[in-house]
Amino acid sequence: MQTINLSVDINSLIEKVDGLVWGWPLIILILCAGAWLTVRTGFVQVFHLGKALKYMVKNEDAGEGEVTSFGALCTALSATIGTGNIVGVATAICLGGPGALLWMLVAAFFGMATKYSEGFLAIKFREKKSDGHFLGGPFYYIEKGMGEKWKWLAKLFAVFGVLAGLMGIGTITQINGITTAIQNFFDPDKTNIAFNLFGNDYSWAVVIGGIVVTLCAALVIIGGIKRIAKVSEIVVPFMAIIYILFALIIVISHIKDIPAAVALVCKSAFNPQAALGAATGVTLKLAMQKGIGRGIFSNEAGLGSAPIATAAAKTENTVRQGLVTMTGTFIDTIVICTLTGLSIVVTGAQNSYVAGVFEGVNITTTAWQKGLPWNENVSSFILMVCLAFFAFTTILGWDYYSERCLEYLTGSQKVIKVYRVIYIIAVFIGPYLTVSAVWNIADIFNGLMAFPNLVALFALSGVVGRETRAYFKKKNHEDITDIAAKNR
């Protein structure tokens, strides 16, 4: 009698669904939305990036909200700057060749216009609740911007948001990434086993690391958006700067290799077989799919997550906050992912890739060990700390996203409190669960969030474009008037 391996069949089914959700239709749709919004906003990411970076660090004096503009941005960045910046970039380059990095930047360029529009709409259609806190995001700009008849689409987005947060992207996958990194550094051979569960050995490094991270996450999550924003304002900039500085050391110390690396990236982006050789199996289609797909997954432009945090910002100006929101994609992908990609290519770490054995974080670790001018253990430790903090802040950011989605669906603060407990429990048990299937499930719900959000972005692009052009026309007129008055 033939035995059917049900777990393998389920995993295979999950992988197929994940492939369908994150296939070419979604990627093309997100790119088209970014290109369309780029045109409708008058290339906002080109002509107004300087203003955006200025507004990013200069909070408004007036305006209603729960946290500063910078705090809202850091909350959004806490969810986007994560394992994707370290592991995702390495995976894209290994599977799609160095050219994937260029396609990642293309996705980020158009994604900046998408993020701007999401931030704009989040402020325009947010709602102030009776206790004074603000709620907003795709669910409200779908319902209020498109009309009550589209409320079902808003609820669908919120359901996907709750499931994405709880089912893995904010809990199990992140804590698993942290404890794996801790174990790989402190006890790679698993010599200090704490217990065996379902045939798997778990070291004390995993157990202690999991408990510490869970306790830290619980202390922050229980405090709500204000505490999450306060922690994010400190941790996110600090860790982003640390990571950027060390990645820059690698790039600068290999400055003579930069021209060749850039040439390889550009050549393999359009003709990978000529650049890498036909034997690699990398095609133009694969380079584009891995680069664009990982770029979108990293910065979340078009998925609708960031505007949930944006809605809490203290601001009275939709355009200004839209510009601040846009800087998230610039920092996440154009700065951090580019530096990760370059550090891998200039050191040749991608050549160490072995499917199923040596991939993901191991590739980036190799790049840091080869590229940094000191002991390999020091390099590994620094990268482990960066990965741990990036994943930790992602836990915080996605708790907030899923809480706000749940609040929209239920309107009950009691339900939110119960959800926080369940979320913390999911973080606690995360190190002891099989992560591959969970990653795919999280991937699926994350991708499904994009479809309702993209419908709204296309439908409301006229509003975004019209009010954006009017704002900058008025702003330019005021600037000219001020200059003329000073010259009198």
Image: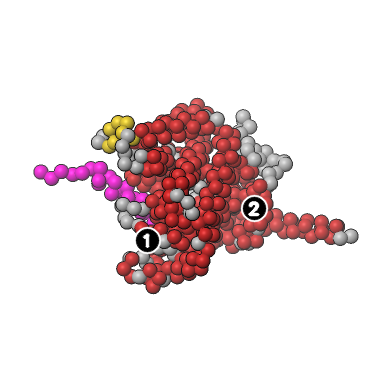
- Quadrant, the C terminus: bottom right
Q: Residue furthest left?
A: 1
Callout 1 amino acid: Asn
Image point 25% across, 46% down: which residue? 9
Range of residues picked out in magenta: 1-29
Q: Nearer the viewer, residue 153 or 428?
A: 428
Marks 1 and 2: which is nearer the front?
Answer: 1
Q: Residue furthest bottom?
A: 274
- Quadrant, the N terminus: top left
Q: Nearer the viewer, residue 348 or 294?
A: 348
Binning the other alpha carbons within 10 Å of mark 1 as few (below 14), some (14 to 19) or many (20 upward) gives: few
Residue 178 in view, yes or no: yes
Image point 48% across, 63% down: which residue? 102
Image point 54% across, 55% down: which residue? 248
Q: Is residue 51 left or right of residue 427?
A: right
Position above or below: 424 against 141: above
